[in-house]
Amino acid sequence: MSRIGVFVCHCGENISRTVDVERVAKEAGEIPGVAYSCDYKYMCSDPGQNLLKKAVAEHNLDGALVAACSPRMHEKTFRKAASAAGLNPYLCEMGNIREHCSWVHEDREEATAKASDIVKFMVERVKKGKSLAPITVPVTKKALIIGGGIAGIQAALDIADAGHQVVMVEREPSIGGHMAQLSETFPTLDCSQCIMTPKMVDVANHPNITLYTYAEIEKVDGYIGNFQVTVRKKARSVDESKCTGCGVCMTKCPKKKIPNDFDQGHGMRTAIYVPFPQAVPNTPVIDRQNCTMFQSGKCGVCQKVCGPGAVDFEQQDTLTVESVGAIVVATGFKLYSIERKPEESAIQGYGEFGYGTIPDIIDGMTFERLASASGPTGGRILRPSDGKEPKQVVFIQCVGSRAREKGISYCSKVCCMYTAKHTMLYHHKVHDGQAYVFYMDARTPGKGYDEFWRRAVEEEEAVYIRGMVSRMYQRGDKIVVMGSDTLVGVQVEIEADLVVMATAVQAQDGADLLAQKLGISYDKYNFYSEAHAKLKPVECATAGIYLAGACQGPKDIPDTVSQASAAAAKVMTLFAKDQLERDPVVAKVNEKYCVGCLACKKVCPYGAVEEREIRDRQGNLVKVVANVNPGVCGGCGTCQATCPSKSVELDGYTDEQIMAMIESL
Amino acid sequence: MTPGKKNLLTYSYYPGCSLHASGREYDISTQALFKALNLGLKEVPDWFCCGATPAHNVDELLSLSLCAKNLSLADQVEGDLAVACAACFSRLKTTQHHLKEDDTKRHQVETAIAGPASLGKPVKHILEILARDFGLARLEESVKKPLLGLKVAAYYGCLLTRPPEVPELDDCEDPSIMEDILRALGAEPVKWSHRMECCGANFTLSRPGVVLKLSNAILTSAQEAKADCIMVACPLCHGNLDIRQESINKYGTPEGSLMGNIFGSDYIPGSEDGARREMPIFYVTQLAALAMGVPTDKLGLESVIVDPRPLLYEKNLL
């Protein structure tokens, strides 16, 4: 006969409001095999845990059931307490009478009956439970950072400085990301390049960091502590080991009029190029789509002038496999492109703003390039159409953001601040110019942020108009901006020379595909999901993968850097141990009954099942069976449901346990 | 749309009050166009006013009930419901939308009209029928007299595409359905700024100053874009732009109108030399029927205020 203890939690009033917990505890005491039952206001608190520990000792319990919240919330807590009391932690289970019962029901009588049922079948499960020992796996103390923007750079430097190896993979030819494009940063107006480029150089020079630029993640295998990541290094057409970065190839390249993405298409570059002069690594890449050699086979000037002979037209993509123990995802964001509604997209465009057809309507990032000393205008604010200095500039906030009817309901968080910054930069450069800002709300929480915004309004003479813009059109060389001033209650028309739209921050292109490779979850906007919004903000639900920066949601630089350092700290915590303990809830194959059909192998989402040959002493093949690698197994139970001969079972979720639970009802 | 033996497609037809009164030429040209395209059009028996703007401003339930009753009458006639007036179209679609979303309201309305509300009857604007059901390719093939050289400002007004969840006609702020039809007819749609702006609508009676100002901006914008004429798909827009055009041209923008402008100059539009020529206003069905070779005396061209015939004569379309 078992001796099980049942502990029913009130969860303050969360459970006891709807469920008669005392009755549940009393009825539990009557279940055969239950040696002790009680109820308590907060089981998870220190006295609550002590109650459990004391009961285990006093009543000589051989199993425990805590009827409380979801096991996702506190299973670990109670298993730890049970373990401290000398019980095998896997013989301590939770019955979820909060999320599955009190929170979703109103009728007290019925909810109490359901809670009792939950307790009843969970007791049966505990009865048939087995003592399990945690699985230990080795940890590879090397981290992979995906993305070389400020988030990735910060995380990489923190982990590398702690003495661990780091591999950084960046999709573009240079690291630096969006921050390298910015002119000056809020709220201190320090030059972005001046604080960013030294960090980029630190990454390149760090002995612990291996940098792959112009490279993408091809495939991710393995699990926490033991990931195998295949990196595709795209053909650069320039041998990085030979190139000295002298730049002669770029000066001689005859194709000189290719719009430069780094300057948002407003500057020009050559076909063999580095995205910007401070690029890291300072190794050019050939844009094969625009290179005469690749298109027509006639040119090759860069190869002829290259002293070290680094230009290699034959270069192919290469695949490299890296073994790492942890992954930090820092893939950043892109800005919403406001054009006509794309086909098959949930996101509506802004055709009424004439974006894409009126050259002097630009986005915030383009304004950053215009204001940047390294930008296409050398830091002068000149409008794209005719290169004149605009005297009236209209800034529009919340374009795409907070617009449910256009498909995005979230706030992009950085625009209020960077628009205030833009008005200042404009005012500093064009003294007789006037900036207008259309805004919904000015959202400026953050250290020194509200003061910064007030400065834009009070000292830098930006006129803030609370209201949205309905339409813009070109009249002569002006852009007529039609909008409303909702504080005064009138419609407004402004003839602007330049319009800057603070467009929504969106997840990077391909963010969903990368998430699928990594096996991490993402929301409907393709932002990656953290494991817990408050308590696990940098961890993914998938163990060993961490998030940093705007790939998780819109973020400014201070927040991004904080999160990146937090992710680095998590990685270092993981690397502090040589062995990693994992839950032993994994599938096991009964080799006696397994017929080797390997149906389980086909359905296993983790790739944990492999074939195993059983041979006799003479080495003759007896049979082939399935074998589960416990390190890889995710414990989902799909194999168990699939196996036609019932010869694979998940520890802690055996058929015997589940049948007993069903029979108890 | 029901494929018929006699006609290519058959529609039930809700003309609405305007088309039997001030917008008679819209009705005449719609009938003529459908006949020319071999499309059946059968008027809903005993239809009555959809309530238009006044009803839903006064009593929402009344407005919904009026439309629900009309929809149930339309249910007795075969084919999707063709609607020409932008306001009737908007009200009928809005009613279906609201009643589908709100069971309480549907119950109230069904009690009021003593019968089920017909929420499944597809309500289609003439533009939709031409561009989608009949199809632009077939429309282009059917053209007998292409409207070559005619520069047209396609004017959508407020209700054809808004609010976005109701009419489902085209992109709510940047549509192209009218321009697509114009191209199919051989005409040249101009790119202009005020195609989605309000004409002042029914303020034409209570606050004519508002209409003068707003419609003036529309006419000016069309003229600046070098349009020969404006094409509309709403009898009220037509009324404001056509009937009031003389007063608009004569008086310009009245002082002290509703539209304050606190920044920059108050832009009072007008052509460069101050004078403005008359701008004919066509219904989409008039231009389409003209292109289909319908005799010009069956287009209702004679009953509008700004006579479009000199323009058509100049373009060799008469």
Image (spheres, coloured by chain):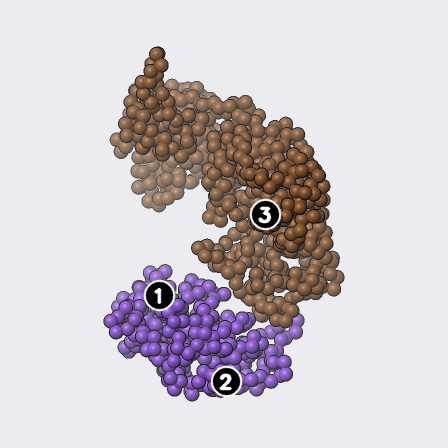
Q: Secondary structure at mark 2?
A: helix
Q: Residue at x 65, y 38 (%)?
A: A310
Taking A610 as reference, is A312 above or below it? below
Q: CA distance from mark 3 to mark 1?
A: 63 Å
Question: Pointer 3: what residue?
Answer: A297
Quadrant location of the C terminus of chain A in the rendered image: top left
Q: CA distance from mark 3 to mark 2?
A: 56 Å
Instruction: Tell me which amino acid carries mark 3.
Output: Gly
Instruction: Tell me which amino acid carries mark 2.
Output: Glu
Q: Earlier in the sequence, mark 1 or mark 2?
A: 1
| In front: label 3 or label 1 | 3
Instruction: Tell me which amino acid carries mark 1.
Output: Gln
Place of residue B231 in the rendered image (x, y in percent of width and height, measured from the top left): 47, 76
Q: Which chain is purple?
A: B
Question: Pointer 1: what residue?
Answer: B96
Q: Which chain is brown?
A: A
Q: Secondary structure at mark 1?
A: helix
Q: Does residue A185 appear in this view? A: no
Q: CA distance from mark 1 to mark 2?
A: 45 Å
How packed mark 1 is, by other alpha carbons closer than 10 Å (few <14, some 14-19, many 20 or more), is: many
Task: For mark 2, name the chain.
Answer: B
| In front: label 3 or label 2 | 3
Place of residue B246 in the rendered image (x, y in percent of width and height, measured from the top left): 53, 86
Task: For mark 3, name the chain.
Answer: A
Q: Secondary structure at mark 3?
A: loop
Quick check: do tags 3 and 2 share a chain?
no
Taking A323 as reference, is B206 above or below it? below
Quadrant location of the N terminus of chain A in the rendered image: top left
